[in-house]
Amino acid sequence: MIPFVEWGIGSMDMNKLFFWKRHLSWKLMFVNGIVVLIVIWLAGFSLKDFACVTVGQFETVGLETTRSFNQVMQFYLWRASFLAIVVGGLVHFFFVRKLLTPLNILTHSIQSVMKGEQTEPITQQGEDELGRLIHHFNHMSAVLHREEQHRKRWMSNISHELRTPISNLNGYLEALTEGVIVGDPVLYRSLYEESQHLSRLVDQLHSLSVWEAKQLTEQEKMNIQIEKLCNQVVQSFCLDASKKGIHFHNDIEPYEIRINPQGIKQVITNLVANAVLYDIGKEIWIQGSVANGIYKFSIANYGRPISEEAQPFLFERFVKGDPFRPRKGDITGTGLGLAIVKEIVEQHNGEVGLQSDNSKYTFWFTLPIS
Protein backbone atom coordinates (compact mmCIF):
# COMPACT_ATOMS: atom_id res chain seq x y z
CA MET A 1 0.00 0.00 0.00
CA ILE A 2 1.36 3.42 -0.94
CA PRO A 3 1.34 5.75 2.05
CA PHE A 4 -0.46 9.09 1.77
CA VAL A 5 2.82 10.95 2.25
CA GLU A 6 4.09 9.58 -1.06
CA TRP A 7 1.07 11.12 -2.75
CA GLY A 8 2.06 14.51 -1.35
CA ILE A 9 -0.84 14.54 1.10
CA GLY A 10 0.10 15.12 4.71
CA SER A 11 -1.98 14.65 7.80
CA MET A 12 -2.94 18.35 7.80
CA ASP A 13 -4.21 18.09 4.22
CA MET A 14 -6.29 15.03 5.10
CA ASN A 15 -7.82 16.94 7.98
CA LYS A 16 -8.72 19.80 5.66
CA LEU A 17 -10.57 17.38 3.41
CA PHE A 18 -12.93 16.71 6.31
CA PHE A 19 -13.50 20.38 7.19
CA TRP A 20 -17.19 19.63 7.62
CA LYS A 21 -16.38 17.78 10.82
CA ARG A 22 -15.62 21.14 12.48
CA HIS A 23 -18.96 22.72 11.53
CA LEU A 24 -22.25 21.55 12.96
CA SER A 25 -24.23 23.16 10.12
CA TRP A 26 -22.42 21.04 7.51
CA LYS A 27 -23.02 17.91 9.55
CA LEU A 28 -26.73 18.67 9.83
CA MET A 29 -26.98 19.43 6.12
CA PHE A 30 -25.13 16.24 5.26
CA VAL A 31 -27.40 14.12 7.44
CA ASN A 32 -30.47 15.91 6.11
CA GLY A 33 -29.36 15.32 2.52
CA ILE A 34 -28.81 11.62 3.16
CA VAL A 35 -32.26 11.29 4.73
CA VAL A 36 -33.97 13.17 1.88
CA LEU A 37 -32.10 11.11 -0.71
CA ILE A 38 -33.05 7.82 0.93
CA VAL A 39 -36.72 8.83 1.21
CA ILE A 40 -36.87 9.97 -2.44
CA TRP A 41 -35.15 6.87 -3.70
CA LEU A 42 -37.37 4.54 -1.72
CA ALA A 43 -40.54 6.35 -2.73
CA GLY A 44 -39.41 7.16 -6.28
CA PHE A 45 -38.10 3.74 -7.20
CA SER A 46 -41.16 2.10 -5.70
CA LEU A 47 -43.38 4.37 -7.79
CA LYS A 48 -41.24 3.86 -10.91
CA ASP A 49 -41.26 0.08 -10.57
CA PHE A 50 -45.00 0.10 -9.99
CA ALA A 51 -45.56 2.29 -13.08
CA CYS A 52 -43.26 0.14 -15.21
CA VAL A 53 -45.00 -3.06 -14.16
CA THR A 54 -48.39 -1.53 -14.82
CA VAL A 55 -47.39 -0.32 -18.28
CA GLY A 56 -45.78 -3.67 -19.10
CA GLN A 57 -49.09 -5.49 -18.48
CA PHE A 58 -50.72 -3.83 -21.47
CA GLU A 59 -50.17 -5.96 -24.60
CA THR A 60 -50.71 -2.95 -26.87
CA VAL A 61 -47.55 -1.35 -25.52
CA GLY A 62 -44.51 -2.54 -27.34
CA LEU A 63 -41.11 -3.42 -25.91
CA GLU A 64 -39.51 -0.28 -27.29
CA THR A 65 -42.22 1.91 -25.79
CA THR A 66 -41.79 0.23 -22.43
CA ARG A 67 -38.04 0.79 -22.54
CA SER A 68 -38.52 4.44 -23.43
CA PHE A 69 -41.04 4.84 -20.66
CA ASN A 70 -38.58 3.38 -18.15
CA GLN A 71 -35.85 5.78 -19.28
CA VAL A 72 -38.15 8.78 -18.93
CA MET A 73 -39.19 7.70 -15.43
CA GLN A 74 -35.53 7.18 -14.52
CA PHE A 75 -34.68 10.67 -15.77
CA TYR A 76 -37.50 12.36 -13.84
CA LEU A 77 -36.61 10.37 -10.75
CA TRP A 78 -33.00 11.57 -10.79
CA ARG A 79 -34.05 15.15 -11.57
CA ALA A 80 -36.62 15.14 -8.76
CA SER A 81 -34.01 13.74 -6.37
CA PHE A 82 -31.50 16.40 -7.32
CA LEU A 83 -33.98 19.26 -7.03
CA ALA A 84 -35.30 17.94 -3.71
CA ILE A 85 -31.78 17.73 -2.28
CA VAL A 86 -30.88 21.25 -3.48
CA VAL A 87 -34.10 22.87 -2.29
CA GLY A 88 -34.10 20.91 0.98
CA GLY A 89 -30.45 21.79 1.53
CA LEU A 90 -31.04 25.52 1.02
CA VAL A 91 -34.09 25.59 3.28
CA HIS A 92 -32.25 23.51 5.85
CA PHE A 93 -29.20 25.81 5.64
CA PHE A 94 -31.16 28.94 6.50
CA PHE A 95 -33.01 27.24 9.36
CA VAL A 96 -29.81 25.72 10.75
CA ARG A 97 -28.00 29.05 10.43
CA LYS A 98 -30.71 30.75 12.47
CA LEU A 99 -30.52 27.94 15.01
CA LEU A 100 -26.73 28.08 15.33
CA THR A 101 -26.46 31.88 15.65
CA PRO A 102 -27.18 31.82 19.43
CA LEU A 103 -24.69 28.96 19.79
CA ASN A 104 -21.98 31.03 18.08
CA ILE A 105 -22.76 33.97 20.38
CA LEU A 106 -22.64 31.60 23.34
CA THR A 107 -19.25 30.28 22.19
CA HIS A 108 -17.77 33.80 21.99
CA SER A 109 -19.20 34.63 25.43
CA ILE A 110 -17.66 31.49 26.92
CA GLN A 111 -14.29 32.43 25.44
CA SER A 112 -14.61 35.89 27.01
CA VAL A 113 -15.43 34.35 30.39
CA MET A 114 -12.39 32.07 30.08
CA LYS A 115 -10.24 35.21 29.58
CA GLY A 116 -11.71 36.75 32.73
CA GLU A 117 -13.70 39.38 30.86
CA GLN A 118 -17.19 40.48 31.83
CA THR A 119 -19.85 39.57 29.28
CA GLU A 120 -23.24 41.04 28.59
CA PRO A 121 -26.22 38.72 29.15
CA ILE A 122 -27.25 36.87 26.00
CA THR A 123 -30.80 37.56 24.85
CA GLN A 124 -32.84 34.45 25.56
CA GLN A 125 -35.32 33.38 22.89
CA GLY A 126 -37.72 30.57 23.64
CA GLU A 127 -37.96 28.06 26.44
CA ASP A 128 -36.49 25.10 24.58
CA GLU A 129 -33.21 23.34 25.36
CA LEU A 130 -31.16 26.14 23.75
CA GLY A 131 -33.10 28.80 25.65
CA ARG A 132 -32.53 27.02 28.95
CA LEU A 133 -28.82 26.64 28.13
CA ILE A 134 -28.53 30.39 27.52
CA HIS A 135 -30.44 31.11 30.72
CA HIS A 136 -28.08 28.94 32.76
CA PHE A 137 -25.04 30.51 31.09
CA ASN A 138 -26.28 34.02 31.93
CA HIS A 139 -26.79 32.95 35.53
CA MET A 140 -23.33 31.33 35.68
CA SER A 141 -21.72 34.43 34.18
CA ALA A 142 -23.43 36.67 36.73
CA VAL A 143 -22.32 34.42 39.60
CA LEU A 144 -18.73 34.36 38.35
CA HIS A 145 -18.69 38.15 38.02
CA ARG A 146 -20.12 38.55 41.51
CA GLU A 147 -17.56 36.13 42.94
CA GLU A 148 -14.74 37.97 41.18
CA GLN A 149 -15.90 41.28 42.63
CA HIS A 150 -16.21 39.57 46.00
CA ARG A 151 -12.66 38.23 45.71
CA LYS A 152 -11.26 41.68 44.86
CA ARG A 153 -13.13 43.25 47.76
CA TRP A 154 -11.93 40.41 50.01
CA MET A 155 -8.29 41.04 49.12
CA SER A 156 -8.73 44.80 49.55
CA ASN A 157 -10.30 44.31 52.98
CA ILE A 158 -7.55 41.95 54.11
CA SER A 159 -4.82 44.39 53.10
CA HIS A 160 -6.69 47.23 54.81
CA GLU A 161 -7.18 45.31 58.05
CA LEU A 162 -3.54 44.22 58.15
CA ARG A 163 -2.04 47.56 57.12
CA THR A 164 -3.18 49.60 60.15
CA PRO A 165 -1.89 47.39 63.01
CA ILE A 166 1.30 46.54 61.14
CA SER A 167 1.99 50.22 60.45
CA ASN A 168 1.41 51.06 64.11
CA LEU A 169 3.70 48.28 65.28
CA ASN A 170 6.45 49.23 62.81
CA GLY A 171 6.22 52.90 63.72
CA TYR A 172 6.40 52.39 67.46
CA LEU A 173 9.12 49.73 67.23
CA GLU A 174 11.22 51.94 64.96
CA ALA A 175 10.83 54.86 67.34
CA LEU A 176 11.80 52.67 70.29
CA THR A 177 14.80 51.31 68.43
CA GLU A 178 16.11 54.76 67.50
CA GLY A 179 15.46 56.14 70.97
CA VAL A 180 12.94 58.71 69.76
CA ILE A 181 10.49 57.58 72.45
CA VAL A 182 10.93 55.74 75.72
CA GLY A 183 8.84 52.71 76.45
CA ASP A 184 6.29 52.74 79.24
CA PRO A 185 3.48 50.39 80.35
CA VAL A 186 0.86 52.35 78.37
CA LEU A 187 2.85 52.07 75.15
CA TYR A 188 3.59 48.40 75.70
CA ARG A 189 -0.09 47.78 76.38
CA SER A 190 -1.00 49.48 73.09
CA LEU A 191 1.56 47.41 71.18
CA TYR A 192 0.25 44.26 72.86
CA GLU A 193 -3.34 45.10 71.81
CA GLU A 194 -2.26 45.61 68.21
CA SER A 195 -0.44 42.29 68.30
CA GLN A 196 -3.52 40.58 69.75
CA HIS A 197 -5.67 42.11 67.06
CA LEU A 198 -3.35 40.72 64.39
CA SER A 199 -3.40 37.28 66.02
CA ARG A 200 -7.21 37.22 66.15
CA LEU A 201 -7.41 38.37 62.55
CA VAL A 202 -5.06 35.64 61.33
CA ASP A 203 -6.83 32.98 63.41
CA GLN A 204 -10.24 33.96 62.08
CA LEU A 205 -8.98 34.15 58.50
CA HIS A 206 -7.67 30.62 58.90
CA SER A 207 -10.93 29.41 60.47
CA LEU A 208 -13.03 30.99 57.73
CA SER A 209 -10.88 29.52 54.96
CA VAL A 210 -11.09 26.07 56.55
CA TRP A 211 -14.88 26.17 56.77
CA GLU A 212 -15.28 27.58 53.25
CA ALA A 213 -13.19 24.73 51.83
CA LYS A 214 -14.99 22.19 54.00
CA GLN A 215 -17.92 20.02 52.96
CA LEU A 216 -19.53 18.92 56.21
CA THR A 217 -20.51 15.23 56.18
CA GLU A 218 -22.77 13.19 58.45
CA GLN A 219 -19.73 11.36 59.80
CA GLU A 220 -18.49 14.65 61.28
CA LYS A 221 -21.73 15.18 63.21
CA MET A 222 -22.91 13.67 66.46
CA ASN A 223 -25.91 13.93 68.75
CA ILE A 224 -25.28 16.72 71.25
CA GLN A 225 -27.36 18.24 74.05
CA ILE A 226 -27.52 21.80 72.81
CA GLU A 227 -28.19 23.34 76.25
CA LYS A 228 -25.04 21.76 77.70
CA LEU A 229 -22.94 23.03 74.80
CA CYS A 230 -24.37 26.52 75.25
CA ASN A 231 -23.76 26.51 79.01
CA GLN A 232 -20.12 25.57 78.42
CA VAL A 233 -19.66 28.56 76.13
CA VAL A 234 -21.43 30.99 78.50
CA GLN A 235 -19.35 29.72 81.41
CA SER A 236 -16.15 30.59 79.54
CA PHE A 237 -17.31 34.25 79.32
CA CYS A 238 -18.41 34.61 82.93
CA LEU A 239 -15.14 36.21 84.06
CA ASP A 240 -15.09 38.86 81.31
CA ALA A 241 -18.80 39.50 81.78
CA SER A 242 -18.46 39.93 85.55
CA LYS A 243 -15.64 42.47 85.08
CA LYS A 244 -18.01 44.54 82.92
CA GLY A 245 -21.01 43.95 85.18
CA ILE A 246 -22.87 41.97 82.53
CA HIS A 247 -25.51 39.46 83.60
CA PHE A 248 -26.58 36.48 81.44
CA HIS A 249 -30.22 35.32 81.21
CA ASN A 250 -30.28 31.77 79.89
CA ASP A 251 -33.47 30.18 78.57
CA ILE A 252 -32.27 27.18 76.58
CA GLU A 253 -34.78 24.42 75.84
CA PRO A 254 -33.07 21.04 76.36
CA TYR A 255 -32.87 19.15 73.11
CA GLU A 256 -30.56 16.60 71.50
CA ILE A 257 -29.60 17.65 68.00
CA ARG A 258 -27.19 16.18 65.45
CA ILE A 259 -24.49 18.74 64.73
CA ASN A 260 -20.78 19.24 64.40
CA PRO A 261 -19.99 20.20 68.02
CA GLN A 262 -16.80 22.17 67.26
CA GLY A 263 -18.55 24.20 64.57
CA ILE A 264 -21.69 25.09 66.55
CA LYS A 265 -19.59 25.80 69.62
CA GLN A 266 -17.62 28.31 67.56
CA VAL A 267 -20.89 29.84 66.30
CA ILE A 268 -22.21 30.37 69.84
CA THR A 269 -18.79 31.59 71.00
CA ASN A 270 -18.59 34.23 68.25
CA LEU A 271 -22.11 35.49 68.96
CA VAL A 272 -21.60 35.65 72.73
CA ALA A 273 -18.20 37.31 72.25
CA ASN A 274 -19.76 40.02 70.08
CA ALA A 275 -22.53 40.55 72.60
CA VAL A 276 -20.04 40.96 75.46
CA LEU A 277 -17.70 43.12 73.38
CA TYR A 278 -20.28 45.65 72.24
CA ASP A 279 -22.74 45.50 75.17
CA ILE A 280 -23.98 48.73 76.78
CA GLY A 281 -27.03 47.42 78.67
CA LYS A 282 -25.27 45.09 81.14
CA GLU A 283 -27.68 42.25 80.28
CA ILE A 284 -27.58 39.50 77.64
CA TRP A 285 -30.53 37.20 76.89
CA ILE A 286 -29.72 33.78 75.44
CA GLN A 287 -32.66 31.70 74.20
CA GLY A 288 -33.12 28.42 72.40
CA SER A 289 -36.34 26.66 71.42
CA VAL A 290 -37.79 24.05 69.07
CA ALA A 291 -40.49 25.03 66.57
CA ASN A 292 -41.60 23.82 63.13
CA GLY A 293 -38.84 21.26 62.72
CA ILE A 294 -35.98 23.63 63.59
CA TYR A 295 -34.03 24.66 66.66
CA LYS A 296 -33.77 28.44 66.87
CA PHE A 297 -31.00 29.99 68.94
CA SER A 298 -30.83 33.74 69.68
CA ILE A 299 -28.64 36.17 71.63
CA ALA A 300 -30.09 39.59 72.43
CA ASN A 301 -28.68 42.64 74.22
CA TYR A 302 -28.52 46.42 74.12
CA GLY A 303 -25.41 47.10 72.11
CA ARG A 304 -23.50 49.89 70.45
CA PRO A 305 -25.42 51.40 67.50
CA ILE A 306 -25.31 49.55 64.18
CA SER A 307 -26.11 51.65 61.14
CA GLU A 308 -29.18 50.57 59.18
CA GLU A 309 -27.12 50.51 55.99
CA ALA A 310 -24.70 47.98 57.48
CA GLN A 311 -27.26 45.66 59.11
CA PRO A 312 -28.18 43.63 55.97
CA PHE A 313 -24.46 42.94 55.33
CA LEU A 314 -23.20 42.16 58.84
CA PHE A 315 -22.69 38.48 58.01
CA GLU A 316 -20.38 39.29 55.11
CA ARG A 317 -16.60 39.40 55.46
CA PHE A 318 -15.04 42.48 57.06
CA VAL A 319 -18.39 44.23 57.53
CA LYS A 320 -18.80 45.97 60.88
CA GLY A 321 -21.64 47.89 62.48
CA ASP A 322 -19.83 51.10 61.64
CA PRO A 323 -16.93 50.49 59.22
CA PHE A 324 -15.64 54.05 59.76
CA ARG A 325 -15.64 53.81 63.56
CA PRO A 326 -12.11 53.86 65.00
CA ARG A 327 -11.24 51.14 67.48
CA LYS A 328 -11.35 52.33 71.05
CA GLY A 329 -10.27 50.43 74.12
CA ASP A 330 -11.39 46.84 73.82
CA ILE A 331 -13.49 47.39 70.68
CA THR A 332 -11.22 45.36 68.43
CA GLY A 333 -13.53 43.39 66.16
CA THR A 334 -12.10 41.94 62.96
CA GLY A 335 -15.31 41.84 60.93
CA LEU A 336 -14.92 38.09 60.36
CA GLY A 337 -16.73 36.55 63.34
CA LEU A 338 -20.23 36.76 61.84
CA ALA A 339 -18.97 35.59 58.45
CA ILE A 340 -17.66 32.45 60.17
CA VAL A 341 -21.04 32.06 61.92
CA LYS A 342 -22.86 32.23 58.60
CA GLU A 343 -20.54 29.74 56.91
CA ILE A 344 -20.81 27.14 59.69
CA VAL A 345 -24.59 27.45 60.03
CA GLU A 346 -25.11 27.15 56.28
CA GLN A 347 -22.92 24.03 56.32
CA HIS A 348 -25.58 22.66 58.71
CA ASN A 349 -28.36 23.73 56.28
CA GLY A 350 -29.47 26.44 58.71
CA GLU A 351 -30.04 30.18 58.46
CA VAL A 352 -28.73 33.28 60.25
CA GLY A 353 -30.18 36.72 60.77
CA LEU A 354 -30.46 39.91 62.80
CA GLN A 355 -33.47 41.66 64.33
CA SER A 356 -33.13 45.19 65.68
CA ASP A 357 -35.40 47.25 67.89
CA ASN A 358 -33.81 50.63 68.48
CA SER A 359 -30.59 49.78 70.32
CA LYS A 360 -31.62 46.19 71.15
CA TYR A 361 -30.14 43.68 68.74
CA THR A 362 -31.02 40.00 68.43
CA PHE A 363 -28.67 37.75 66.47
CA TRP A 364 -30.19 34.35 65.69
CA PHE A 365 -29.51 31.16 63.80
CA THR A 366 -31.52 28.02 63.08
CA LEU A 367 -30.59 24.36 62.79
CA PRO A 368 -32.81 21.68 61.23
CA ILE A 369 -33.63 18.90 63.68
CA SER A 370 -35.00 16.32 61.25
Image: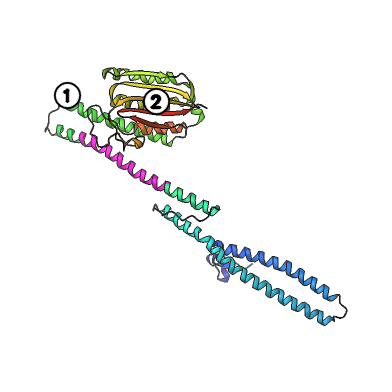
The answer to whether residue 14 shows anywhere in this view is: no
Q: Position of residue 181 (x, y in %)?
A: 12, 31
User: Alpha-carbon neighbours of circle 1 within 10 Å: few (<14), some, or many (≥20)?
Assistant: few
On screen, 338 above or below 156? above
Q: Position of residue 336 (x, y in %)?
A: 34, 33
The answer to whether residue 263 shows anywhere in this view is: yes
Q: Position of residue 12 (x, y in %)?
A: 52, 65
Q: Quadrant of the N terminus?
A: bottom right
Instruction: For marks 2 and 1, give the one nearer the viewer.
Output: 2
The amino acid type of the residue labelled 2 equals: Ser
The amino acid type of the residue labelled 1 equals: Pro
157 is within the stretch colored magenta:
yes
Task: Determine whether, in the image, residue 177 is placed left or right of residue 197.
Answer: left
On screen, 232 above or below 153? above
In the image, what residue occupies the spot 84% across and 76% down? 56
Residue numbers of the magenta segment: 143-169
Q: Residue furthest front?
A: 358
Task: Determine whether, in the image, residue 250 is placed left or right of residue 44.
Answer: left
In the image, what residue occupies the spot 75% across and 70% down? 45
Which picture quadrant has residue 70? Answer: bottom right
Q: Which mark is residue 298?
A: 2
- N-terminal label among 2 and 1: 1
72 vs 309, nearest the viewer: 309
User: Alpha-carbon neighbours of circle 2 within 10 Å: few (<14), some, or many (≥20)?
Assistant: many
277 vs 3, nearest the viewer: 277
The residue labelled by disc 1 is 185
Q: Main secondary structure of the magenta part?
A: helix
Number of numbered discs visible in the structure rendering: 2
Q: Does the residue at mark 2 contact the one at mark 1 (Cβ under 8 Å)? A: no
Q: Residue furthest right?
A: 59
Dot 1: element: helix
202 is within the stretch colored magenta:
no
